[in-house]
Image: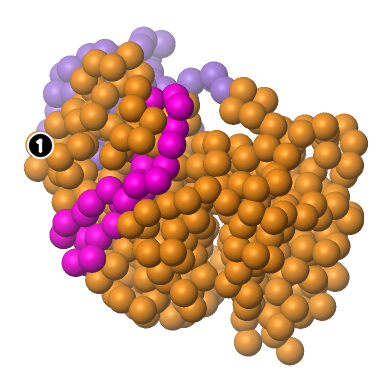
Amino acid sequence: MSKIRVLVGTRKGAFVLTSDAKREKWEVAGPHFAGWEVYHVKGSPADPNRLYASQSSGWFGQLIQRSNDGGKTWEPVGNKFTYDGVPGTHQWYDGTPHPWEFKRVWHLEPSLTDPETVYAGVEDAALFRSNDGGQTWLELSGLRGHGSGPGWQPGAGGMCLHTVILDPADPQRIFIAISAAGAFRTDDGGETWRPINQGLKSQYIPDPTAEVGHCVHHIAMHPSRPGVLFMQKHWDVMRSDNAGESWHEVSGNLPTDFGFAIDVHAHEPETIYVVPIKSDSEHYPPDGKLRVYRSRTGGNEWEALTQGLPQSDCYVNVLRDAMAVDSLDSCGVYFGTTGGQVYASPDAGDSWAPIVRDLPAVLSVEVQTLP
Amino acid sequence: MIRVWLPPHLRTLARIDGEVTLDVAGQPTQRSVLDALEAAHPMLRGTIRDQVTQQRRPFLRFFACEEDLSHEPPDAPLPKEVASGAEPLLIIGAIAGG
């Protein structure tokens, strides 16, 4: 029988949640790296027992941890992230030039085929790659060297590269997203990049349709259709049918189109999930009701999923990397909240139950479906 | 023999109980002691000093002999009590935060 392993990063450590395919009874292991912020934990698709974790602290900086046994034991690997060449400047909040400074790793994306290769999306925004299991890191500086780089500005959470999507059909193609620069794509393995933000409209920048400057919160793709992308922007849920060449809005009947997380059903590429959040100044669900919204039409037509979720007095947030799906026949959907709950649905969102209720604030959730 | 006392999180990371003892050739300085510490425990690289700038992390302090040595030049000699092992070099994390 298959097993499910849920990898949870929190403000005070990492947790590994495991269950059989019924997804009813869960074992909770952790905290790993107790007391440290763990922005992200993710397993290698090529070797599910190879995990990478981003461990950081305001006191002690950034560490990268690696596990070869599915998270039972860990070893620190390389944590030297040096920008290529002269780092240069980007715009600070007040519009003045500010030197690029490494702060933390937001997202780790293991290669689809090689357990030793892993990408790191960092703050201040840049993409790094390791080909030796995380021991050494080199910047793919063509991204930061894109001509628009000096004009990028941080979002309220920092200028972070938070989304890395590897194209399963084209190993040379990678999508990334930066708050608040927007989405970018390479078609040559990371040498050169170009912005893919046409169709985005952001009223909070001087030119709402500018080439860069959009606060993209997260992007999701179904592996069977790598040309179709779904985006939760600061405001607006967006869709692209041409690998980001252009986007159109699919917010439809959502109660609010602000939010962070977005994901795609494992077997239905037109079924997508978001968690609407009231506004950018009120980071909690509308009306105190925690509702996941599902569209079975690739956007525009949304239904609220509420069974098992709190429908009163709920004021948590669901952060951008805190939603994931498993690939069992009945697709499981998972998300974590800033209130420390991790919810699971074994039936594609129809019903939900908490796996755990009282973890530290959840920063990220990833899921592995194990044989 | 130089004695170094680390914050609890770094002792956990380096799998150390109690204080660290290091052999440092010549007159010990902050730089030579930290170099020896990182050589003995490579997982500490980047946690006390920035990997690129080699600057002390802002929320850490270096104390010894009831003095704050944090702003001393990294190549300044450490007090003779630290050099002799009579007193430890204390690496302290700020008590800010939650």
Residue A194 located within the stretch drawn in magenta: yes
Looking at the picture, how far across and down is residue A33, in whole percent?
A: 55, 49
On what subunit does the disc labeled 1 rest?
Answer: A
Q: In which quarter of the image is the N terminus of chain A?
A: bottom right
Side (left or right) of A99 relative to A116: left
Residue B18 located within the stretch drawn in magenta: no
Q: Residue at x 44, y 58 (%)?
A: A240
> Residue reaching furthest left?
A85
* Quarter occupied by residue A371: bottom right
Asked whether the viewer can see residue A147, the reply is yes
Looking at the picture, how far across and down is residue A212, in whole percent?
A: 30, 38
| Prevailing secondary structure of the magenta residues | loop
Q: Residue at x 30, y 21 (%)?
A: A92
**Hey, what amino acid is under mark 1?**
Val
Q: Residue at x 77, y 63 (%)?
A: A349
Looking at the picture, how far across and down is residue B56, in whole percent?
A: 29, 26
Please report the bounds of the magenta region as a residue range: A179-205
Side (left or right) of A305 relative to A113: right
Side (left or right) of B41 relative to A51: left
> Residue reaching furthest top?
B67
Q: In this view, does A316 lie above or below A9?
A: above
Asked whether the viewer can see residue B25, the reply is no
Which class describes the residues within 10 Å of circle 1: few (<14), some (14-19), or many (20+)? Answer: few
Residue carrying label 1: A86
Chain A colour as displayed: orange
Q: State the SS at label 1.
A: loop
Q: Residue at x 89, y 55 (%)?
A: A308
Along the viewing direction, whichever of A153 and B92 lies nearer the viewer: A153
Along the viewing direction, whichever of A120 and A153 lies nearer the viewer: A153
Q: The purple chain is which one?
A: B
